[in-house]
Structures are given as structure tokens and as C-alpha cells.
Amino acid sequence: MNDVQKTDGPRLLDVRDLEVTYANGAAAVRGVNLHVDAGQKLGVAGESGCGKSTLALALLRLLPAGAKVSGQILLDGEDVLTMKWGRVRAVRWAGASIVFQGAMHSLNAVHRIGDQIAEPILLHRKATQAGAEKKVGELLEHVGLPAARAAAYPHELSGGQRQRVMIAMALACDPRLIIADEPTTALDVMIQAQILRLIEQLVAEQDLGLMMISHDLAVLSDTCDRLAVMYAGRVVEEGPATEVYERARHPYGKALSATFPRIGDPASRFAPRGLPGDPPDPSALPTGCTFHPRCPVALESCSTEDQALREAGPHHRAACVHAGAPLPAQPTAAPATAERTP
Ligand SMILES: Nc1ncnc2c1ncn2[C@@H]1O[C@H](COP(=O)(O)OP(=O)(O)O)[C@@H](O)[C@H]1O
Ligand SMILES: [Mg+2]
């Protein structure tokens, strides 16, 4: 993204030409470039199956064996893809850490949460038991839970509390970058808002970088400074969050912002909702622009010619033939539905 870098040193996270192909041939991430500086919040949006989690897992080399990865993942200038395993393990906690969706599955049901948060502190920080326990108490209080909850088992906590524990665990070794993959998707709206505010507060207080992944563009645009919209493994639109959310220049970005309207926005009630069909199977991608089969404003050339990201506004880029001008008015029904004959 072409926004101005805050410091002269290497970026906190700089992903260049990242490609991931699973062992079965699924090209899940295709030529992704993005970056996060300290204190910045990047939102990565896209429907299920667009490659967001694959991207997150690739960043810390957590992909299953057999996945082919190329490109560069520079964390503070150091390429994660060429690091020795010992270094990767250290970086996973102290460099960058991930908060996943669905804390119940990520926490171990038979261990007290305090012990689970203490584990990486003991291992990577070589802390004493007493030192680790003190840090656990501080972390719990930091995420809005009483220190005494360290003695609880995961099933004794609510969904929101468990997600707070996951965040405390992610912060255990003072990482500089947090990658949050759908951190609030499993939570109800009220709790979701609380967790989002907590993440925002922690990022601001500690000058962390945040990469937050969600299918919900409205949530991301509320929380993040910049957005990258992924479709079929590629970034198809990127720019300042408000710019992308309110003036999307890619028809996919536009459809996503219409699908997730801001609560209380009267205009959004009249906007087209949803998008027919599904993202393509990454083992059998359509020719040309991968979005063309679902695109309400596709031209004939879109089925054969792919588009690279191009300027679409201030610091705003979109990979669409229409990117240079506001999108043409969309037909009320997408072509797939409109053209269907009985
Ligand atoms: N282990 C795997 N092997 C093969 N294909 C996979 C694997 N994991 C994910 N995929 C495929 O890669 C694509 C992207 O998946 P994913 O990164 O989970 O997307 P998202 O997080 O955006 O929903 C999907 O088509 C998915 O089926
Ligand atoms: Mg995912």
C-alpha cells in the first residue's frame, strides 16, 4: 500500500508477493503485498474461502506440511520464510502472535487458564514460576478479567471471557504485532463490540501493529486505519478504511460494504445486499478477472483479461477495469440471476 511510512527502519510487517498453494493444488494466496507499521491497524476483509486464514497462518509458518509458499514475509526486516525453526518459535510469541476465532477450541479444556497463559512465559521468557504467575495476573487485569480468574477452567468462563483469555495469551510475551483472525465472529454483538474496543485500546497503549481479519467490512472499517479486500487469494482493493468502506471502487468491495452496512445508516437499507454465488474454488479459478462470473458490472473483456491493482483515489487502489472512475450503476439483480431463463 502506498501510504507514507512513519519511520526510516524496516516495516514491522512487510509481505511481498506472497503465494501459497496447498498440496492439493489449491492456489489459496496469490501474489499478496501488504504491510503493517507499529501503531497501525490493517483490516483484511473477504468472504469465507478467499484466503484470509491461509495468509495469517503463512505469516508464522503455521501452514500444513506440503503447502508451497513463496515470496517474502519480513518481520522487522527479517524474512520469516527463511528463518531457522528455533527462531520461528521465538518469533511466534515475541514477534507476532495470533488470536484465533472460537476460543473454546484453542484453549485446553483440562488446564486452568492461568497455567495456559503462563506456559509461553515460562518457556520463552525463562521466567520463574512466581514471575510467570505475577505476569498472568497482570495480563488478565489488562484484558478486563480479575487476576483470580487464573484458577478457572475454560468451561467456567463465558465466550467473551474466553476470548479475553486468548488475547491475554497472545500478549504474554509482549509481541509487537497481533494477528487477529475473526476474533469476534463467534460472539454476540454486544460482546463483540467490547472485545473490539479492548483490542483497539491495547494496540494504542502498546504501539502494536494489528492485522485484523474479518468477513465483516463494517467491523473492520470501524476498527482499522486501512483495509485490504481479498478475493480468490488476491488483494483486489486496498486503501484508507473509510475510503474503501464508503467509496469502494471494486465491485466486490462495494458488495461487501453493502452486505455489512453500519448499524443505523439509513442509506444502507436501500443498498443491494449480499452477492449471489460463492468465491471460486482455488483449484479451478475462472479465467480473466476471477470475480467476473459474479460481477454485476463486468465487461466482455473481464472474462479474458485480469486486472492488476491500479490507482482509484487517494492512497486507494483497486484491481478493476472500472477502478479509475466511480463504479457504473449496478443492475438491481446480478447477471447470474437476471439472465437465468426458465
Ligand atoms: N489444508 C488445506 N488444503 C487444501 N485447501 C485448503 C486448506 N486450507 C484451506 N484450503 C482452501 O484454501 C482456500 C482459502 O481458505 P482460507 O484461507 O481458510 O480462507 P478464509 O480464511 O478467507 O475463509 C479455500 O478454498 C479453502 O478450501
Ligand atoms: Mg478464515
Image: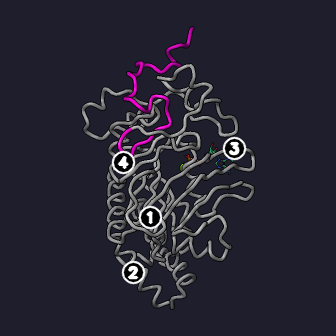
Label 3, secondary structure: give it.
loop
Mark 1 closeness class: few <14, some 14–19, many ≥20 residues within 10 Å: many
Mark 3 to mark 1 CA distance (whole Å): 33 Å
> Is 323 covered by the magenta stretch?
yes
Ranked by sequence position, the earlier of labels 2 and 4 is 2
Magenta-drawn stretch, dominant element (helix, strand or loop):
loop
Label 2, secondary structure: give it.
helix
- The image shows residue 148 at horizontal and vertical percentages of 38, 79
Ranked by sequence position, the earlier of labels 1 and 2 is 2
Give the residue type at disc 1: Arg
Query: Pointer 1: what residue?
Result: 162
Query: Pointer 4: what residue?
Result: 240
Cβ of mark 3 under 8 Å from ligand 1: the answer is yes
Q: Of residues 85 and 287, which is closer to you in this image?
A: 287
Give the quadrant of residue 91: bottom right
Ranked by sequence position, the earlier of labels 2 and 3 is 3
Mark 1 to mark 2 CA distance (whole Å): 15 Å
Q: Of residues 212 and 303, which is closer to you in this image?
A: 303
Ranked by sequence position, the earlier of labels 3 and 4 is 3
